[in-house]
Amino acid sequence: MAIERYNAPAREKHWQHVWESRNVFKASNDDKRPKSYVLEMFPYPSGRIHMGHVRNYTMGDVLARYKRAKGFNVLHPMGWDAFGMPAENAAMERKTHPAKWTYDNIAAMRAQLKSMGLSLDWSREFATCDVEYYHQQQKLFLDFYKKGLAYRGIGKVNWDPVDQTVLANEQVIDGRGWRSGALVETREMPVWYFKITEYADELLDALGDLSRWPEKVRTMQANWIGRSEGLLMKYALSGDRLPSGWQELEVFTTRADTIFGGSFCALSPGHPLTLELAKSDPELAAFVEECSHIGTSEEELNRVEKKGFNTGLAATHPLIPGRKLPVFVANFVLMGYGTGAIFGCPAHDQRDFEFATKYELPITPVVIPEGQDPATFDLGGEAYDGPGRIANSDFLNGLSIDEAKAEIAQRMEEIGKGERRIMYRLRDWGISRQRYWGCPIPVIHCEACGAVPVPEAQLPVRLPDDVTFDVPGNPLVRHPTWRQVDCPSCGKPAVRDTDTMDTFVDSSWYFARFCSPDSERPVDLEAAKYWLPVDQYIGGIEHAILHLLYSRFFARAMMATGHLNVKEPFAGLFTQGMVTHETYSRSGQWLLPSEVRIEGEGDQRRAFEIATGEPVEIGSIEKMSKSKKNLVDPDDIISSYGADCARWFMLSDSPPERDVIWTEAGVSGASRFMQRVWRLIDEALPKAAPVGTPKPQSFGPDADALRRAAHKTLARVGQNIEALRFNVAVAQIYEFASTLHSALGKTGPGMDWAIREGVELLVQMFGPMMPHLAEECWERLGYNTLLADQPWPTVEEALLVDDTMTIAVQVNGKRRDELTIARDASKAEVEAAALKLEPVIRALEGRPVKKVIVVPQRIVNVVA
RNA sequence: GCGGGCGUGGCGGAAUUGGUAGACGCAAGGGGCUUAAAACCCCUCGUCCGUCAAGGACUUACGGGUUCGAGUCCCGUCGCCCGCACCA
C-alpha cells in the first residue's frame, strides 16, 4: 500500500508553530553551556526576501542548529538594517511615510523568514530605525565625540547630485555613487567624521590574527588601508612669485634612495600652494580647472597624458648644494595621498619618466641592476623599478636600495630635512548624510558656542514624523520647527544639525546590540562579554571592505569608550556565493522565469513565452537581479515544494563560497529526495526494532556493515558542517540514504536494531538542513520529543575502524589491483600478499622487483 | 600594472591534503511496473582500442620537473574570474 506523499507546505507550518510556541530557539544570557554566536548579515527591508537571503540564512541556520545539537548555548538573532534611501524614494513615489513603508516591509519579510523555519531567537529582533536603537547610537556618537573619535571638519566631500548627499570614499566606485551611479562631484562642506585612521595601523596588523577570515577579504582590507613606509622630506622653495609662508615644500616618498635622481617637484592641482598661485595666475587657474575634469576610471587614467604646468618656482635639493629643481603642477599627482606633492625621479618611476620625457627634464639612473655598469646602463625607454645598486648618488653609491633608504632617512633626519613617516590610503570616515531617513546627529549649532553635543538627558533626538517629500533635498531642513532649539550651553536660540548618519553606522554595531537588545545602554557589557565575538558571521563578499572594516573600527571605538571588551567583532567570517539563473528575453524585453516554458533538453532546449506562445531567447546565466528579471520568488518555491526543499537545494552541489545556479531540475531533485526519505522511513519502520529496544550484544555481518556506514557518515557529516562544506555533507547523506535503502532487504542478527539506528541517525543528520521533515520523521519514528531538542548523536569510534582494509596495489605507480587484508597486517605480510596478485605478476613481466613501498592503510607500490 | 583565486566527464562538483581520480547529484541511455502517462524501482554512463568479453592504453588547461607515487608540490605557458589602482 503506497503511503501519501509528504505534504511539506502544510507540515512545515505545523512545526514552525510548535517551535515558536515552545520558545525552542530563545537564547539565554545566563547559561552554563559554552556559547556560540552564529550571525548572518541582517537584511535591508526592501519588501521581499530573495534567493540570496534564502541561501545566506539557510547556511547560518544549519550551523546554528548543529551547534545547538552539539550542546552550545546558541545565539542566532535577526534584525533589520532599516534606515536608508529606498524608504525615502518610496515616500516620494507613493506618498507614504518612510516609517510606514519600512515597517510594512519588515512585517512582510518577517513572515517570509518565518516560513523558512529558521532557528532564530525572534525575541531579540529590532530594526535600526527603532527609536530605542538609534537613541543608543546617538549615545555612542557622543561618547566617540568625547574621546576625540568623532569630529567635525570642513572637508572636500564626494557629493552625489542624484541622491543629494555626501558619500564616503568607500562608497565612490569609479567616480560614481555606489547607489545612484551618478558622477560624483567634489564639494566643500562641514561634515562629521569618525576617526578610523586612528586605528589604521591596528586594523591592518590585526588582520593577521583573523585566521578564520577568507584570505581574500583580508587582502582587500589591507590594500584599502594601504600602509606605506617612507620619508617626509622638506625642499626649500624660492622664486619671485613665491607666496609668503611657503618657504618649504613637503613631499612624501617611499623611494628616498633615489633622491639623487630627482629632477623636478610636482604639486597636485588641489595642493594649497597650487590654489594660492592660481589666484594670481589665470593660466594656472585654467590648468587646474582642466585637471578637475579628468575622470577616475581606469581607462581614462591610462589614456590621459601626463601634463604639467611650470610654476616658475624652484625647489632646492636638500643634499646637493646649489641644485635647483623646477616645480610643476602635474595632473597625475593626487591630493588625497601623502602630502599632495612629490619629487620626481624619472629614471625609476614610470609616471615621472613620461613626464620628464615630455618636458625634457634630466633622467639620471641611480639604481643600477646587478651586473650592469653605471656608465653604460641604458633604461631602454622606460623607468627601471627593479633591484640593484645605487650609483650617481654621492655617499650612497654602492649601497643596496634598502641600505640607501635607511642611510638617507638617517641623514635627512640629522639635518632636519626629513622624517620617517608611515602613510595610509585610508581616510577618516565622513558620516554626515543630507537625508531624512537616518539616525539624527545629536548636535546643536549655536552662533556663540559652535557645535554643541546634545546632552545625554535630552536624547533621543527623534526624527519628526510630520515631514513631506514633495521636493528634493532634506525634509529636516524644511521642517518648520524641528531645527529650532535652545543652545544646551548658553540657552540662546540655536539650530539642530539636520544631517543624519550614514547607514553603515547602524550596521557597525548591531551584532553587539543583539547581546542585550533591551539594555538602557548601547550594550550591556556583561552580555557582550559573554557573547562576543561572533563565532561565525556569514554574508556576501560585497561587504568585504565597507561594512566589515567599519565594524572592526566600531568595536575598537566602543572598547575605547567602555562599551565592549573585544577588538575584533567577528572571529569567523564566511562569504557565500551568489544565486544565479538563466536569463530570458523576447524582442529586447527581459522575462521572468515564471513567464517562460522550457521544452526539450540539451541542444534541443527551447523556451517560449507562456502568455503568447512566442519563442524566447535563452541568455547567459547571471546573478539574480530585478533588472534582468531572472528571479525566482522564494515564496513560490516554499509554498509549492516547501522550505526544506529550497534549503536542501541551496546546500546541495555547489560549494557555499561559489555561485549556485538555480534550476528547476535541481529543485525537483531536492524534492524527490525529500519524498524518498519519507518513503524510506515508511519502509524501514516495519523492519526496525521498536523505540527503546536495548542494543544487542552482537551483530551479524550485514547489520555490522550498516552500522559502520552509519557512524562513518555521521562523523563525516559533522566535520563537514563544522567546516561549512555543506555540499559534501549533503552528498554523504545521499550516499548513506542509499546504503540504508539497500540494507532494508537484509536480515540477520541485530539487523532490526541497526535499521532503527540507521534511520534515526539519518534523520538527525539532515535535521539541521531540512528541520521540518526531520521533525516529522522523528515523530513517525515514535518519539514525542522534538528533534530540535535532541543532542547530536555520538559517533561510536570503534565503528570507524575496520578490521580489514582494502588498499590499491600499484606497479611502478600504476594501479593494477587492490588487496583486502587484515588491518593489523605487517608490512611484510602486505608486501607478500601484493606480490602474489595475478595482475601484479603480469604487469611485472618477469622483471625483478627492486623495491616495494608499503604505506600502511594507504597503498602498495611495487617498483620494478 | 599590483594583489587574490581558479582551470577535473555532457553539467554542478568529490578526492582522507602527496597514496585506488571522477564520490554524490543533475542530464542521458536501457529495462521493469502501468491500458497509458506521471510517480517509483533496477541497470549503464570519462575517452579510445578490443566483440558490449577478458584485457589494455590514455585522461584532472598545456609543457617540463621533483618523487616509488602528482589533480594535489615546484618552474614555465595559455585561459578565465574577482578586488584594487596615476598611492609617489
Image (tube, coloured by chain):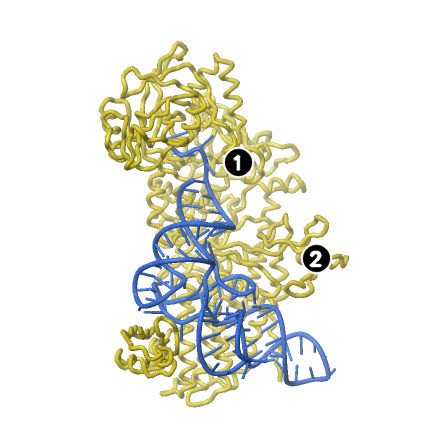
The subunit carrying tag 1 is A
Quarter holding the C terminus of chain A is: bottom left
Which chain is yellow in the rendering? Answer: A
The CA distance from mark 2 to mark 1 is 39 Å
Q: Which sits in the foreground, B44 or B62?
A: B62
Image quadrant where residue A339 sits:
top left
Q: Earlier in the sequence, mark 2 or mark 1?
A: 1
State the residue at coordinates (65%, 38%).
Answer: A92
Secondary structure at badge 1 equals: helix
The residue beneath circle 1 is A299
Residue placed furthest toward the front: A846
Chain B tint in image: blue
Q: Nearer the viewer, mark 2 or mark 1?
A: 1
Is residue A837 depicted above or below B80 in this figure?
below
Residue type, mark 1 in image: Glu
Residue displayed at 64% across by 41% down: A91
Residue that label 2 marks: A595
Whether residue A797 can be seen here: yes
* Residue A547: image location, x then y, percent: 46, 45
Q: Is residue A722 left or right of residue B79?
A: left
Q: Return the x and y of residue A139 as percentages of the image width and height.
A: 43, 39
Q: Are marks 2 and 1 on the same chain?
A: yes
Instruction: Identify the chain of the residue marked 2, using the numbered disc in the image.
Output: A
